[in-house]
Image: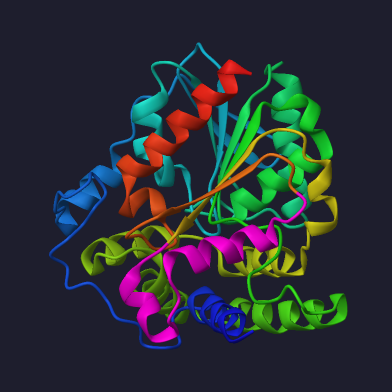
Amino acid sequence: MKVRLSVVSLAFTLAFGGVLPLAAADGTQNSRSGNTQISAAEATNALVAMPPSTAVFEVGPVLVEQFGESGRPLILIPGLASGSWVWQDTVRQFKGNHTLYVLTLPGFSGRAARPGQTYDSARQAVQDLISSRKLTKPVLIGHSLGGIMALDLAQKASGQLAGVIAIDGLPVFPGSENMSLEQRQQAAQSMSGKMAAASPAEFVAQQGDYMKHTGVIDPALAAELAKLTAKSDPAATAQYMAEVFKTDLRPGLSKISVPVLLMAPYNPPDMVNFRISESMKRDYYKSLMRGTANLNVVTIAPARHFVMWDQSQKVGQEIQQFLQQVDKN
């Protein structure tokens, strides 16, 4: 019980902007490419240097950037306040052998918000993308909010998919698994209200604090990524956060018939005060996914929430192994 409570406490601390002062990296290590340090200026240049897209179009409220034209389709869904830039290393690695469809939700990363267009609208847009483009057995790859959406879609339409990769995206918000629906709704309303009421300067500060303590290990990179997430609409971000917090997909996990890979970040300095080992965090994530028939949970270390930025190579290797396994079946 003590271990479980520690994990729950940590989940809330990390999820809501690092209220507790966590141990931060000194900036000398950035592991995006294994062990290569990346300066803030280099990070900024890299963020805007996406490969040329094959096509750009909209499906409902969602912007879609296509990369590549052959191979099994991969649908990449970013998380809260993020855009296609989250997936740039993944795009570079897989565009030669796959067709990638990289999404940006309305209100995120500089896209205008669309009143009335919510989580359900975005989820439906992914289903419409699959049907309108006649995609055969795509693999859904989602980060955070995107991982939740991928799991949600797999419950509703496993027959249309080949597999799901969720990167730190879980069927229920960690720490809230024992809340009643009413408690979860009240908490969601309170959180979203505070975020939506933030001034532009306060929203920018929130994003900076979140990235520094929760997003990535390197403080310089965190500052650059925060500039991108801060381009999101605060009200839209708050709305999505509230909808995600209210969501509990656990009752439907048994409906997922395709393979699921869940990546869990683990950064030892963040965990030392909580006495949480890498295996303990992996087991906790497995417990939240209980009922999933074909599940593999792996930890990626050292990494924080934006795992694909802290450990680009490791994430790419895990995706590659998963795709190879899917192709064999």
Q: Residue at x 49, y 13 (%)?
A: 69
| Image quadrant in which the N terminus is located | bottom right
Q: Residue at x 68, y 81 (%)?
A: 193
Instruction: Say which of 289 and 43 sits in front.
Output: 289
Residue 234 covered by magenta stretch: no
Q: How many marks?
A: 0
> Which secondary structure is most common in the magenta stretch?
helix
Give the percent coordinates (x, y) of residue 224: 28, 61
Q: Residue at x 60, y 49 (%)?
A: 146
Q: Residue at x 77, y 40 (%)?
A: 256
Residue 188 appears in the picture as rendered: yes
Magenta segment, which residues? 266-291
Residue 117 appears in the picture as rendered: no
Instruction: Say which of 326 and 54 sits in front.
Output: 326
Whether residue 211 sits left or right of residue 262 in the image: it is left
Looking at the image, is 260 positioned above or below residue 55?
below
